[in-house]
Amino acid sequence: MSTQEAKHTPLEYQTTHGQMNILGFWIFLAAEVVLFSTLFATYAVLFGRTADSPLPSELFGAEIVLIMTFLLLTSSFTCGIAIHNMRQGQVKPLIIWMVITLLLGLGFLGFEIYEFMHYTHEGATLQSSAFWSSFYVLAGTHGLHVTLGIGWATLLIIQIVKRGLTPVTSQKVFIISLYWHFLDVIWIFIFTAVYLIGMVV
């Protein structure tokens, strides 16, 4: 890559290795789409099969779901700001916005754990019915992905503090941003297909 080309190319794309890693991660995300599509399909098939356990409309509450949605979608926005700072070569703002992103993600997880504990207390457990099993597996898989994303991003922040912004660290940060935005998109589907529909049916 010429000096002129490098000047106008984002840092994460300036090496062939970085470009291939990013392409490979897009392929990984395609596999993740298949995973979540399977979970959504299973949930749809088992929807309403609650046996003697509570109905989703009896337990799903708009307030907590809206808070969770606000936290996660806001974290996607702050992650986008972090990437903008990265491309400007601003290490400190990048770290600050990444930390804010992770705090919002932790807030989301906290509310999700509270939600699961509340449902369990009300008699809707993983073993209660086919419907609740599919719900916990779908929402729990997403929550597990968020947890992994937080751990992954934390390690990257430590790496940036030690090594600064390089083509290697920048492509790693860009990849985690793709992952984080992907989880937000999945949550929008969960919010719509699971919670909104579950509240009215």
Image (spheres, grey):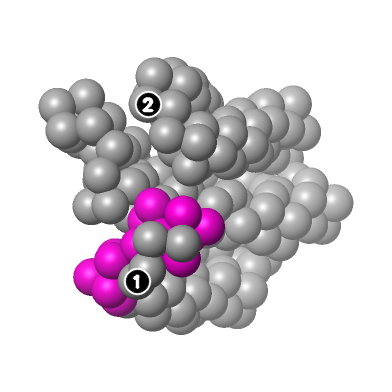
Q: Residue at x 45, y 49 (%)?
A: 177
Q: Please identify the quadrant where the C terminus is shown.
A: bottom right
* In this picture, residue 80 sits left or right of residue 106: right
**Label 2 SS:** helix
Q: Which residue is mark 2?
A: 91
**Label 1 SS:** loop
Q: Residue at x 37, y 56 (%)?
A: 12
Taking depth in this image into account, of 139 and 156 the one nearest to the observer is 156
Task: From this view, report whether residue 118 is shown above or below residue 22.
Answer: above
* In this picture, residue 68 sits left or right of residue 129: right
**On the image, which quarter does residue 92 sit in?**
top left
Q: Which residue is mark 1?
A: 1
Taking depth in this image into account, of 43 and 16 the one nearest to the observer is 16
Q: Residues within 10 Å of mark 2 (few under 14, many from 20)?
A: some
Q: Please identify the quadrant where the N terminus is shown.
A: bottom left
Q: CA distance from mark 1 to mark 2?
A: 24 Å
CB of mark 1 within 8 Å of CB of mark 2? no
Q: Residues within 10 Å of mark 1 (few under 14, many from 20)?
A: few
Magenta region includes residue 81: no
Q: Closer to the N terminus: mark 1 or mark 2?
A: 1
Taking depth in this image into account, of 98 and 187 the one nearest to the observer is 98
Main SS, magenta residues: helix
Image coordinates for residue 20, horizontal then vertical, percent: 30, 75
* In this picture, residue 92 sits left or right of residue 193: left
Magenta region includes residue 10: yes
**On the image, which quarter does residue 75 sit in?**
top right
User: Magenta segment range?
Assistant: 5-20
Q: Is residue 170 visible?
A: yes
> Count of labels shown?
2
**On the image, which quarter does residue 150 sit in?**
top left
- Give, as a three-letter code, the residue at label 2: Val
